[in-house]
Structure formats: structure tokens, C-alpha cells
Amino acid sequence: MRNFLLMATLLAVAPVWAQNDSVTVKEKPENELTLDAQLMTRGEIRRGGLITKDKVQDAEKANFIVERTRLAVGYKRDVLSMRVNIQHVGLWGAEGGGKNLDLHEAWAQLSKYGLFVKVGRQELCYDDERILGRNDWSLAGYSHDVLKFGYEGHGHLAHAFLAYNQNNKNMYGGTYYTGGYLPYKSMQGVWYHYDVPKFPLGASLLFLNIGMECGVPTNHHTVNQQLYGGYLSFHPGRLSTQMSYYRQSGRASLDYTSGTDVPLKAWMGNVKAKYDISNMFSAYAGFDYISGDESFVVPNPGHIGMTLHTELNSFTTLLGSTRNFYGAMDFFYVSTYFSTYSPGLQHLYGGTIVRPLKNLSVDLGYHYMATATKLSGLNMTLGHNIELSASYQLMKDVSISAGYSYMSGTYTMERLKRSTADHKLRWGWLMLVVSPQIFSTKWK
């Protein structure tokens, strides 16, 4: 059925481009070829943290340097465009650089009259990237093997995308899929965005259906979760506001090996505002709420907490840029519910941005973290986080940034993370990004 839909889509739109692509010699379209490179190098210093008691000696410090290298070739001609992006991610000093080469992007697109069809490995980035994003802080980032098609024009953006993943071209053995390049087996999505003419308001709607394996290869089935909601952005003058609300439904796996799944009912909401006081100063504040499981058990040290859930209420996103929203340490993003429970998250934050020089930006922020659900015998507060970061654009394709974060965790966080009493997290980083366009040429 999926193959039929793919072929039907391509056959339906092919005549539109075919008629336009058969041009005479005099009308031969211009070709464009580009070669882009990126080198991202980041050193990190970690001290203290949530380390289990049998590894207290490791809690002192951890220093390392990571690196990502990408080389991308792009081609464009009239209605056709293509891009291939090869990347290597690794750790300085690790054998083989830590990891091997992989393919971050490899796609082709046909577009005309606002219509487009794009197929292959590509990034999916929508709205503020809370639900679907490139997760660029992570070395590998996110990309997806999908067929995407839609329309863009007159303030309207409408995208639909389909994905179906498999480990092997099985002649036998069914369609069991885990441990592959992507965390899901199948995905279908629709996104629509509209910008109001002559008014600083934009609105988006998003629907996702994600299928995950449940069980073992000899006894498995697919469970599907649905995510639906909307995003608003309003930018009158110096004020910028954004808010979103999403719900999750469907079913979720409790135990991969037994194949047990239960209903999923979860939600999240957020609001953020930023005001540019002047060209030099800005202030911002926001609040995130992520639902959690009501019957969340916090066992005593040395014990295993057990509870029977007939329904899951912990909201999660597998594919968002979580570090952009829940603190730079990326410590309290909600983990996947397919193998664990979560008490959710309340996140209140605020800060100021100072631009003392033309290409320099300094950000000082405060974050308050708490669980969304009440915990028996424990306070809901998880910790207080202070973050300082700065970025400087050395030239158009070279930037340097640095940051320092300090988290004062509570006894609740210590119990939830099964940590030692040393719950003072300190983390610093320094990053260089060089992303030049090495080569560009046009010809007919």
C-alpha cells in the first residue's frame, strides 16, 4: 500500500515537470553546483554530577573534545535540485575517530508552481523545532528517510511526509525493526503553516502518527502513537511571543520483550516572550509544562520500584531539539516512555541578552525545574540552574561560542536519578564552527 501511494504521487506530478523540463537548446536552463563544508569542534569540561554510588570516583571531572565534519554537494537546475551531505562525528583521540562516516542527507526534489516532491534522507524542521528539529547541538543531528510533498505559496505552507524503515530486505522473517538508523518503524505527518498578510502573526498545525515495534522478532506487533497540536508566533514591534500546545494519544509499549502495550494520554504546553529593550539589550521569560505519570514510584536506594500502569500520561518527543528548550545541560528532557515512566516537567525560566559589540551576544539565564506530578514523600522541586553563554561571529562563515552552567539539584533529583549526595553539576564548553562554501559555479 505504501509503495502504491509513493508511485501514485510521483506519477501524478511527473507530467507537470516533464512538460516544463523539455526545453529547446536556446531555452536550456542554468545549472548550479555548490560544495559546502562544515567543521564543528567543541571542548567540554564536566565536574560533579549524578553518578551512581559505585562510581563516585568518576564524579570529579570529565574533559573531552568532540568534532563533526560535513561535506555537502548541491545541484540545482530549473525544477530539479539535489543534495548529498556526508558527515563524520567522533571524539579526539578515540580509535577511528570514535565513529565511522555516515550519510546525513541524500535527497532529490522536483518543484514547480509552488508544488514540490522531495524524496530521500533529509532534515525535518518545523516551527521552533520542539517536535521535529535538526537537533544541531548533537554531533550526528537528526535526518529522516522520507517522501515529502506539498505546496508553498501566497503565505501558505502545506507539507505531508511518509516514512517506512527496515533493517534488511527480508525475503523471510517479517518486518521486525529495532536498533536501526531511526528510532521509529514508520511515520506519517501533515504540517500546515499560514502567515497573516500585513500582520505579524503566524500559525501552524501539526499531526504525526509514529509506529514503534512492540515485542520480540518471533512475537511482535506495531503500536502507533498520534501527536497533534498547534504553534503560534506573534511579533508586534519589539515584542516577540510564541506558544504551542500538543497532545499525544494512541498506545505505548510497556515492555518490549513481553509485547505489552497500554493507552497513551499525554499533553504539553508552553509560552515564551522576548522584548528588545534596545539594540543592545533584550529580556525573555517563559514556561513549559510536560505531563507525567500520576503513579510514579520513587524507590528507596537499593530497591526497585514497581507499579502497574493501565495508562501512560508522560509526554515525550523522539525527534525534537530538546536542548533548545529545557536548559543547556539537556538534563530534564522527558525520556522516551516506551521503556520507562516519567513524572513530567515544569520549567520556569527567564534571562537577558546583551549585545555589547556588533557581532557579540551574551546570554544570562535562570531555570527552575520541578516535576509535573506529585511524588510521595518528596518535594516536587528538582533544581535551580544558572547559565551563561556567549557567541561571537568572527567572519561570515566562522563563529566561536562558549558557555558555563551550574545546577543546584535537590534531594528529589538525587532520588530520581539514583545519584550520590553530590548533586552540584558544573559544565563548561567552548565551540568553534567553520562553515565555508568552498566552491560554486553556474553554467548552461
Image (cartoon, helix red, strand yellow):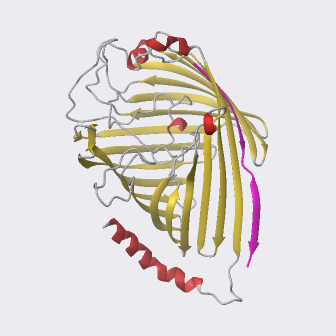
Question: In the rendered structure, which segment of residues is drawn in magenta?
Answer: 426-444
70 vs 433, nearest the viewer: 70
Name the residue rendered at 76%, 61% in the picture.
439
Q: Left of 243 or right of it: where is 304?
A: left
Quadrant assignment, res 105: bottom right
**Screen quadrant of the N terminus:** bottom left
Percent position of residue 319, x then y: 45, 45
Q: Left of 152 or right of it: where is 174?
A: left
- Asked if the magenta segment contains residue 340, the reply would be no
Q: Left of 403 or right of it: where is 212?
A: left
Query: Is residue 332 in view?
Result: yes
Name the residue rendered at 44%, 12% in the picture.
53
179 vs 344, nearest the viewer: 179
Quadrant assignment, res 216: top left
Residue sitting at the far top: 421
191 vs 401, nearest the viewer: 401
Percent position of residue 444, x then y: 73, 79
Q: Is residue 299 above or below residue 36?
A: above
Percent position of residue 303, x then y: 29, 14
Query: Is residue 195 in view?
Result: no
Question: How many circles with numbers are drawn on the protein?
Answer: 0
Q: Main secondary structure of the magenta part?
A: strand
Q: Is residue 112 above or below residue 251?
A: below
Name the residue rendered at 29%, 30% in the picture.
293
